[in-house]
Image (cartoon, grey):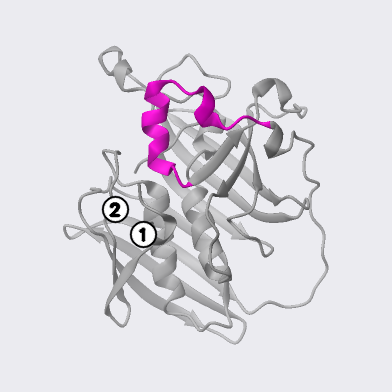
Amino acid sequence: MATIEEALELERLERDIFRGASTKTQLPRTFGGQVAGQALVSAVRTVDSRYQVHSLHGYFLRPGNPSERTVYEVERIRDGRSFCTRRVTGIQDGQAIFTMSASFHVGDIGPEHQDEMPSVPVPEDIPDERSAMTPEQMWLMREWEHWDIRVVSRDQVVRRDGLASQQQVWFRYRHRLPDDPLLHVCTLAYMSDMTLLGSSKVVHQDEPTQNASLDHAMWFLRPFRADEWLLYDQNSPSAGFGRALTSGHIFNRKGELVASVVQEGLTRTLRPESKAARSAFEGFTPTTD
């Protein structure tokens, strides 16, 4: 399937209008991470290189058609001395399918602190998921064949008091990427939608649901490389009314907190006639929007 460079490819149509690539996929709807990643690339291309993206907030409005290219319109909301703000709308067939605000910062000096990285098995001690997958799971995993994704087994997750549902995932892009920090940020934006909603399913493994991302927020806290191992420490503090709230902290191998994510997703109970459509993954819920 598509490499990350292919998935994030854009064509500039006008000063602030871009068109994203349509890539080969097995999914019936455009993967939400691809839409968010392309939207972020669009915003990046309208900002001076001295600014680095530090946050994004997006809403998935309609399902995307993976066979059609998406047009991204960028609004230059603010250009300040320290911060820039962009608003991006993804459009297919004249309708908005995604909207996002992204903020950029030149970086300053100030106090520093961070949460401690949880104690988990190192990724090398976790079997490659592909070695133990069913044929149905392998079919879905081919969608992200360029990613190495290793879910910490539930019996090895250190449970923290008061957290309703937890999941931990090591991941990295399998191939060496260029050194451009913004490419790694956009790659992580793509990846961040891939497993997070699955944290809400850990305590509901036997309940089939229809899943889709509804909104997505990220904060980029420290430099990182997406082609090196990152730990996605996830939890779901609440689920109800057909929706689940999820959050995740992303650490590098040094224990540095490099990004944080919050997402609400659709977790609607499937009707009996629709149960055959449930995801093949348990604890790994890819989302399409």
Q: Position of residue 18 (x, y in %)?
A: 30, 71
Residue 150 image-quadrant placement: top right
Q: Is residue 102 above or below residue 237?
A: below
* Front residue of 118 and 56: 118
Residue 134: say if magenta.
yes
**Which span is picked out in magenta?**
126-146
Question: Callout 1: helix, strand or loop?
Answer: helix
Badge 2: few (under 14), some or many (20 or more) residues near its Cα, within 10 Å? some
Report helix, strand or loop for mark 2: loop
Q: Residues within 10 Å of mark 1 (few under 14, many from 20)?
A: some
Q: Amino acid at mark 1?
A: Glu
Q: Quadrant of residue 287?
A: top left
User: Relative to 151, is 148 above or below?
Assistant: below
Distance between the alpha carbons at the discs numbered 1 and 2: 7 Å
Res 166 visible: yes
The reply to whether callout 1 and callout 2 are in contact (CB within 8 Å) is: yes
User: Which comes sooner in the sequence, label 1 or label 2?
Assistant: 1
Please indicate whether residue 96 sits to the left or right of residue 231 in the image: left
**Is 155 in front, or is 287?**
155
Q: Residue at x 70, y 20 (%)?
A: 155
What residue is disc 1 on? 6
Which disc is residue 275 wearing? none
The residue depicted at 48 percent of the width and 42 percent of the height is: 194
201 left or right of 59? right
